[in-house]
Image (cartoon, coloured by chain):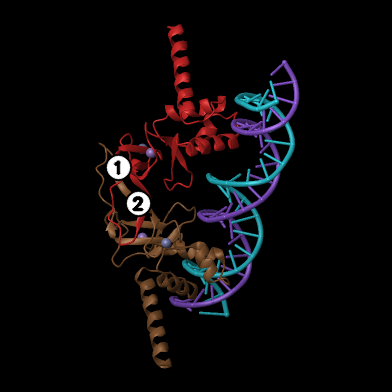
Chain colours: A brown, B red, C cyan, D purple
Amino acid sequence: MRAAMVINYRNMLKNLDKLLQDKNIRPTAMRLLALEYISSQQTAVSLSDLEAAFHRADRITLYRTLKTFEEKGLVHSIMDGTGSVKYALCEEGCECAPEDLHVHFFCNKCRETICLPMLRIPKIPLPDNFKQEEASLVIKGTCGRCN
Amino acid sequence: MRAAMVINYRNMLKNLDKLLQDKNIRPTAMRLLALEYISSQQTAVSLSDLEAAFHRADRITLYRTLKTFEEKGLVHSIMDGTGSVKYALCEEGCECAPEDLHVHFFCNKCRETICLPMLRIPKIPLPDNFKQEEASLVIKGTCGRCN
DNA sequence: AACCGCCTGCAATTGCATTGCATTGTTTAG
DNA sequence: CTAAACAATGCAATGCAATTGCAGGCGGTT
Ligand SMILES: [Mn+2]
Ligand SMILES: [Mn+2]
Ligand SMILES: [Zn+2]
Ligand SMILES: [Zn+2]
């Protein structure tokens, strides 16, 4: 039992490692820990969340870790209107292109931000000469757990 | 001609005055000027915009003017992701209720934020137990003038 | 070992939003 | 009309998140 857990943990680390490698991110200790934390969360993560989870780590390093993850397409950022940016893992095969765009939900009760990857942002028929490049749809209300 | 202009200006002031009165906002000089400025713009206005337009006015007063306008339902605020909040006049009869929600467009070239009142935010079928209260859809790209 | 580039930690700064408080202006009760 | 009550303004200070600069550390390469 104990041995199996160790093996599973090793496998997990190996998986996280691979996730980073695939996106050309060098797998440092801090990055592995941060990625593990983000992966383990059901909801999007803010810099402050990360900071709270690793109170021994430097806030700026965590900040740059998130920036790197975002730049390399490992996570995407969500501006949910709370004033602090949230981050969540990109889906498998996501290019962060307009087609990949999904809806985000912010719960006014638990104040968590949730990705809804199955809900794509509908195509909006823009006025003449307008060209869409990105889009962000944030719905606010009460989430399933809080209802 | 000159006289006509004066009369028109008086009429305009009277109109702005009425806009304020209708929303239970006391029509002070600053508020009339701010409202005139906001009305005259084709795009949404930030606090900094207002500040630049009235460099003799106090930033905080302008800030509170916008807050008051918003509270009373004269303008609505838009978080376009630039980090500074934009404000635009509410439409006639707008209750700022979910039904009133329209799409906003941010131009990456001219960096202006535009209300698209004819484009309503589509109803999204949320997962079980999720309740929608508000929604915000911001589309980014190139606007009609910049194309 | 010497080198290089990337990563990290700490300090400092920016930018925007927000609050406290004293003052001034406007409304209203007596 | 006057005084009290209330609202708006101006200025100072603060809060909070994001961002930058720089120096030291670490890992991989030759
Ligand atoms: Mn998401
Ligand atoms: Mn609008
Ligand atoms: Zn919730
Ligand atoms: Zn434009």
How packed mark 2 is, by other alpha carbons closer than 10 Å (few <14, some 14-19, many 20 or more), is: many
- Image location (x, y in percent) of residue A98: 29, 53
User: Quadrant for ligand 4?
Assistant: top left
The location of residue A3, given as percent across then percent down, is 41, 92
The mark found on residue A83 in the picture is none
Q: Which residue is mark 1?
A: B120
Residue B110 horizontal side relative to residue A53, left or right: left
Q: Quarter of the image holding residue B104?
A: top left
The label nearer to you, 2 versus 1, is 1
Chain of the residue under label 2: A
Residue A27 visible here: no
Which residue is found at the position 45% from the left and 19% from the top? B12
In the figure, is residue B41 to the left or right of C21? left
Residue type beneath disc 2: Leu
Secondary structure of the residue carrying tag 2 is strand
Residue depicted at 40% across the width and 71% down the height:
A39
Q: Which residue is mark 2?
A: A137
- Quarter of the image with the C terminus of chain B is top left
Disc 1 secondary structure class: strand
| Residue A66 at x, y percent in the picture | 46, 63
Distance, label 2 to label 1, CA atoms, is 12 Å
Kindly indicate the quadrant of the structure image that contains residue B51: top right
**Chain letter for mark 1:** B
Q: Position of residue A76 (x, y in %)?
A: 38, 60
Mark 1 residue CB less than 8 A from any atom of ligand 2 = no
- Residue at 45% x, 46% y is B82
Of the residues shown, which amino acid type is indicated by label 1?
Answer: Arg
Instruction: Reply above or below: B30 against A63.
Output: above
Q: Residues within 10 Å of mark 1 (few under 14, many from 20)?
A: some
Q: Quadrant of the N terminus of chain B?
A: top left
